[in-house]
Amino acid sequence: MPAVLTRRSRWRRLWSRSAPALAAYAALHCWTFPLFLITNGEDVNIGENPTPRDWVVLTLVALAPVPIVMVGWLVSRMSDSRKRAIAATVALSIVSVVIVIETDPSRLPDAAIFTAVVLLLTATGVGSVVGWALRTTVSQLAMMGALAVRALPVVLLTTLVFFNGNIWLMAATIGAGRLGLAIGFLLSIAAAFVVSATKERVRPMLQSPAALPRDCEQLADTPFATMPDAVRSPPLTRTERINMVFVLAVSQLVQIMVVALLTAVIYVTLGLIVLSSALLDEWTRGAPSSSSVSGLTFPVPDSLIHLCLFLGALTFMYISARAVDDAEYRTMFVDPLICDLHATLIARNRYRASIAGKSSVDAADPSD
């Protein structure tokens, strides 16, 4: 929980702590370099019968997340902060070189802005919270099937929406900006449900962050295991309370987002199977049957992508509202997170007591 740390601790060694994200950013640019060499910087129009070059491009695009995640993970495993700082410097240098080769030096400020954002997220602790939520989600993938089952009713309902001609006309005519606003509006409503329910769930913990025996056992094999419990648990600050609610809410929202994206992918696949050119032309009144992403033109209609994103947002809303009152969901997903947070609070109390003890010793030392 980043808010537990002092401000000085959160801003310490930012460069080395940001190395995994910067390394992943460099891996992304390195992965785009072969695409630049293959396409010579020109747009790629992939039709219904892709050429061998098109298949190579599609393969590189599909496999891009693998090296990006792998490089970031490998750098995160470095325990030496000096090596991580070197890795961050090398990564940013590689990004600069690739940008100059692929485009021109005028795009270098984009890399500088991205680096500044990464450093800011690292300093504020948002990056660590999101990373923790993703790791928790990956560790619970085996149980994500149960959450996906809860989405089946809305999937069956949205199937009727999927085959509605008026909805297809809306998806074909709406712009990306307006669609983004609509999806953001729906997601914000769903997030409000989750945050409100989360505040009620953790309210007892926010009021009394006391140590419990079972929570102390979770701190075994950690630096906090040898620290004594505080005689008196200091009350949580406003920032720490917000941090706790934020951590728990983001963890749930990430889990729900995974299922919503899976639903969107299912509908994209269904659309590619059942949609013919004649049917698409009838529903969208002659809208383009291809879409362009970063210079790559795919034989996937924009209207299909827009509609599936909208259906994914509806799924996100449904699961979020369902999770608020679903006792089984809370038992499977929320309660383990709350237990982890309670153990974190115990570590926080011990950490604060340790800092207070050191401050008292320093104040009483006449040699200072």
Image (cartoon, rainbow, N blue to C red):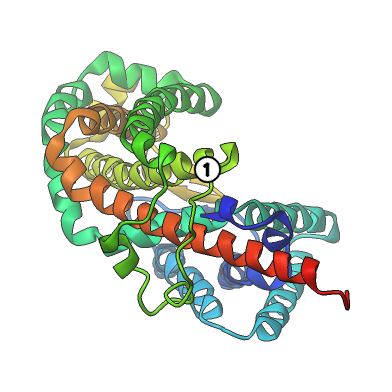
Front residue of 71/1: it is 1
Residue 352 seen from this side: yes
Reply above or below: 302 against 346: above
Residue in the picture at 80% in, 58% down = 108
Residue in the picture at 22% in, 35% down = 276
What residue does disc 1 label? 235
Residue in the picture at 24% in, 41% down = 263
Where is residue 201 shown, x and y percent of the image?
Answer: 31, 35
* Res 285 quadrant in image: top left
The secondary structure type at the circle numbered 1 is loop
Residue 37 seen from this side: no
Q: Look at label 1 and name its amino acid.
A: Pro
Mark 1 residue crowding within 10 angstroms, few (<14) / some (14–19) / many (20+)? some
Reply above or below: 202 against 125: above
Where is residue 281 shown, x and y percent of the image?
Answer: 31, 25
Where is residue 99 shown, x and y percent of the image?
Answer: 74, 64
Front residue of 55/21: it is 21
Where is residue 131 shown, x and y percent of the image?
Answer: 47, 59
Q: Quadrant of the C terminus?
A: bottom right
The single residue placed furthest to the top in the displayed view is 166
